[in-house]
Image: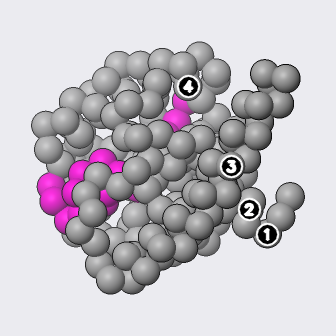
């Protein structure tokens, strides 16, 4: 494994809302940790009906949920309340691993039963990987972002390029 592969997501999806949650549940996952901005809604906006319905569906499936955000408490607490009063951690210092482990603890689940879903490689995915949590990278909901995130997206493109190349090689190996 090369240096760059430490940033590869365990899985990749076009949208949070297109992930097969029933399949995750069948595989033994019982908790989901979410980033908020550009993962569940556009950056800085309140929970919309789509997000609210999504959290209802997760609850019906039997999932526990925790929001994990580097944002300040008013933003995270408000969103958590809007989607049904889920657990949350604000000012998480992602990609530091302590907050990921704390989120699993809040859900009373071992790390191997938890999935992390987020839109950024160098905070969301890398932190989850280092914490030992299965992770799914999703495409950002909206392209408008703060300048520091725009700059990180350029580096993420490089990681995703090599990630996708390894996936193609894996598919070819299976077919041969």
Q: CA distance from mark 4 to mark 3?
A: 25 Å
Q: Which mark is residue 165?
A: 3
Can residue 111 be seen at all in this image of the molecule? no
Q: Residue at x 29, y 78 (%)?
A: 146
Residue 86 placement (x, y as % from top left)? 33, 44
- The nearer-to-camera label among 1 and 3 is 3
Where are the magenta residues, as a range?
Answer: 30-46
Q: How packed is label 4: few (under 14 Cα within 10 Å), some, or many (20 or more)? A: some
Mark 1–mark 2 contact, CB under 8 Å? yes
Residue at point 74%, 60% (across, down):
5
Nearer the camera: disc 3 or disc 2: 3
Residue in the picture at 24% in, 51% down: 41
Q: Kindly identify which residue carries mark 2.
A: 6
Q: Which residue is mark 4?
A: 24
Label 2: element kind: helix
Q: Residues within 10 Å of mark 1 (few under 14, many from 20)?
A: few
Image-quadrant location for residue 158:
bottom right
Residue placed under numbered mark 1 in the picture: 3
Secondary structure category for the residue under label 4 = helix
């Amino acid at each position: 494994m090369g240096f760059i592969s430490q940033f590869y997501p365990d899985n990749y999806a076009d949208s949070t809302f297109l992930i097969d949650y029933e399949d995750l549940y069948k595989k033994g996952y019982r908790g989901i940790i979410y980033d908020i901005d550009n993962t569940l809604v556009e950056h800085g906006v309140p929970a919309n009906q789509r997000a609210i319905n999504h959290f209802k569906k997760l609850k019906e499936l039997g999932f526990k949920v925790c929001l994990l955000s580097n944002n300040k408490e008013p933003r995270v607490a408000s969103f958590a309340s809007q989607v049904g009063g889920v657990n949350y951690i604000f000012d998480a210092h992602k990609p530091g691993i302590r907050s990921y482990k704390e989120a699993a603890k809040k859900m009373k689940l071992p790390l191997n039963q938890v999935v992390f879903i987020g839109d950024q490689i160098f905070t969301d995915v890398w932190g989850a990987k280092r914490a030992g949590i299965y992770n799914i990278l999703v495409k950002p909901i909206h392209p408008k972002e703060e300048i520091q995130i725009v700059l990180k997206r350029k580096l993420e493109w490089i990681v995703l390029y090599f990630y996708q190349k390894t996936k193609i090689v894996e598919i070819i190996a299976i077919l041969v």
